[in-house]
Image: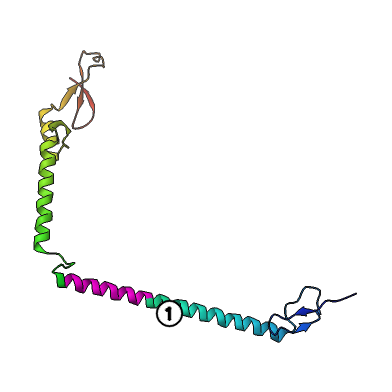
Amino acid sequence: METYLYTCKHCYKEFRPTRRVVQKFCSDSCRVGHHQSNKRVKQKNSDSFKKSEEISKALEKLKKKKRKEKKKEEGRSEGMSLAGIGNAAAGTVIVDTVINMLTPEHNKPATKGDLLDLRNHLNRYRRIKNMKPNLIEQKPYFDLETGLIIYK
């Protein structure tokens, strides 16, 4: 039975495998060393990524700061002003007035006062036309306050 020579992935020396499964390393020390060196490389890459991310965040903060300074120099600020609040209030009043003028009366929403007026105009008792009178010929009515059917 002929065995093949393999090359160690860590030290790159040729060796004969001692197990049935294909071996990648000539010894346990090479296997551990390879794992640790890969771990160090990954750590360095992640550290450099974190540093580049921090640098990009710092640059973005500087850009924002410069933009704010430029706006202040030009007389524009990001804060609220009395003129801006007044303009917004005037715009809202104008829009509400135009909407109120252009909306037909029958499409406007009902208010609580409208409902109370309607209730006052209605009688408390409403005649039920599709029910027959009782045995003593009293007609049925619906009581709006109690929600019961009564006969008068």
- Secondary structure mostly seen in magenta is helix
Q: Dot 1, how many residues are within 10 Å of its Cα: few (below 14), some (14-19), or many (20+)?
A: few
Q: Position of residue 83 (x, y in %)?
A: 9, 61
Q: Secondary structure at mark 1?
A: helix
Quarter of the image containing the N terminus?
A: bottom right
**Residue 77, horizontal then vertical, whole percent:** 16, 68
Q: Quadrant of the C terminus?
A: top left
- Tell whether 54 sits left or right of 30: left
| Residue 40 quadrant | bottom right
Question: In front here: 75 or 50?
Answer: 75
Q: At x 37% / y 75%, what residue is drawn?
A: 56
Percent position of residue 9, x then y? 69, 80
Kindly indicate the quadrant of the structure image that contains residue 32. Answer: bottom right
Magenta stretch holds residue 59: yes
Residues shaded magenta: 56-72
Q: Is 84 rendered above or below residue 69?
A: above
- Whether residue 129 sits left or right of residue 28 in the image: it is left
Whether the magenta-drawn stretch holds residue 105 is answered as no
**Disc 1: which residue:** 51
Residue 125 rendering spot, x and y as whole percentages: 16, 25
Amino acid type at circle 1 is Lys
For image coordinates 10% across by 37% down, the residue present is 101
Between 61 and 126, the one nearer to me in the picture: 61
